[in-house]
Amino acid sequence: MIVQMAACAGILTFLIVLQLRDLLTWRQRRLRERLKIAAGQGTVVEMRVSVVNPVMTVHKRRLRLPSIPALGSVIGKPYMDRIKANLTRAGIPLKPEELAGMGAVLAVVGACAGFVAGRGVLPAVLLAAVGVALPGLWVSQVKRKRAGKLEGQLVDALTLIANSLRAGHSFMQALELVSRDSAPPLAPELARVLRESRLGVSIDQAFSNLVARFDSRDLELVVTGVLIQRQVGGNLALVLDSIAATIEKRVKSRGKVRTLTAQGRVSAWVISIMPFAMAVLVFGFYPDFGRVMLTTPLGLGMLGVGAVSLAVGILLIRKVVSIDV
């Protein structure tokens, strides 16, 4: 037990030292980036419209979480790029290294808690896996909420743009009007599109960047319609009205589907929670019986079969209740 606690304390100390080094050297790293731009190895426009998280430029003072800079080379650049894209779509002002560091810290804490409480390798591994998965689940949840909030603003924004076009404003003036009168997350994203276009980026590329910053099919529909109209011509106000009507019908259809599949989703939650509730009751009231399940081959085999059956059941129920509209 002493060796295990010493190992956990050593890992936590190592992570704290990494974070202190990051806090003490961030000014030097920022100076090196500015010198690189001044030396001609980068431009101000590239710095402003690069594919970094745009929320990082807004939150200039933020909480710096533990980061592991060397982790990117270990897990690979494609995976780090995917983390960066998810953070951008979620609007979370974090670096990929900080999110990975958060997962590492939670994994170490979970492993230590498993060693101390369960006194075994299996609880430590399970809790460490949960700690690694928690940051990704949090980012996915925030990303879905942000996309849903944007989709709820699209119909009013499209109607306002169409009315502005009928009043004689240009398309860019209509976008500026919506960016002033709308609420986040739509307002800052449209302001970013306008800012990119003023810095020399084409409006088509600016809208493509907007789609990349959200995980929304409704936004893809809007941008596709606008880009096609800019190429072939036509009445943009009428196109936007048609897209707004389509999105409104899709929202109503999704609400009906969600109501009809509520029972199936509740069943999925009950099936998911019931085995863990039974495990708590068994290990709490009958610890000897629970210990047999963890120490004998038959008990471990039954737990494995139960876990596989649980996963298959959840996947089947999600397949049934997931209806694409």
Image (spheres, rainbow, N blue to C red):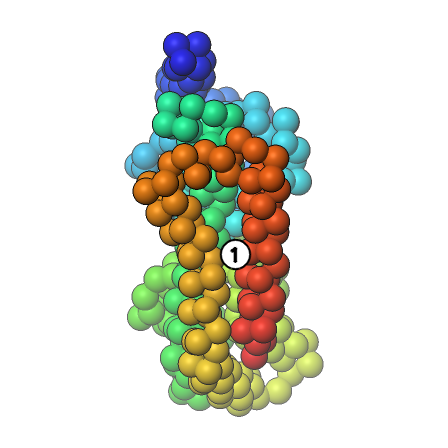
Residue density around tag 1, few if under 14, some if 14–19, many if 20 or more, within 10 Å = many
- Please give the name of the residue rendered at 65% of the width and 77% of the height, measured from the top-left corner: 228
Name the residue: 33% across, 41% down: 284
Vertical arrangement, residue 293 with respect to residue 6, above or below: below
**Residue type, numbered disc 1:** Arg
Residue 161 visible, this orientation: no
Q: Residue at x 33, y 69 (%)?
A: 182
Q: Position of residue 88 (x, y in %)?
A: 49, 49
Res. 121 in view:
yes
**Who is closer to the viewer here, 225 or 213?**
213
Q: Residue 63: percent from the left, percent from the top? A: 32, 34
Q: Is residue 124 above or below residue 278?
A: above
Q: Along the horizontal axis of the image, is 16 left or right of 89?
A: left
- Residue wearing tag 1: 213
Seen from the viewer's position, the closer of residues 91 and 43 is 91
**From the viewer's perspective, is 59 left or right of 197?**
left
Question: Which image quadrant is residue 94 in?
Answer: top left
Q: Closer to the camera, 9 or 243?
A: 9
Q: Could you tell me residue 227's position as x and y percent?
A: 62, 73
The image shows residue 78 at horizontal and vertical percentages of: 66, 40
Q: Dividing the image into 4 quarters, which one contains the N terminus?
A: top left
Question: Measured along the vertical axis of the image, is residue 34 above or below residue 321?
Answer: above
Query: Is 232 drawn above or below residue 175 in the view shown?
Result: below
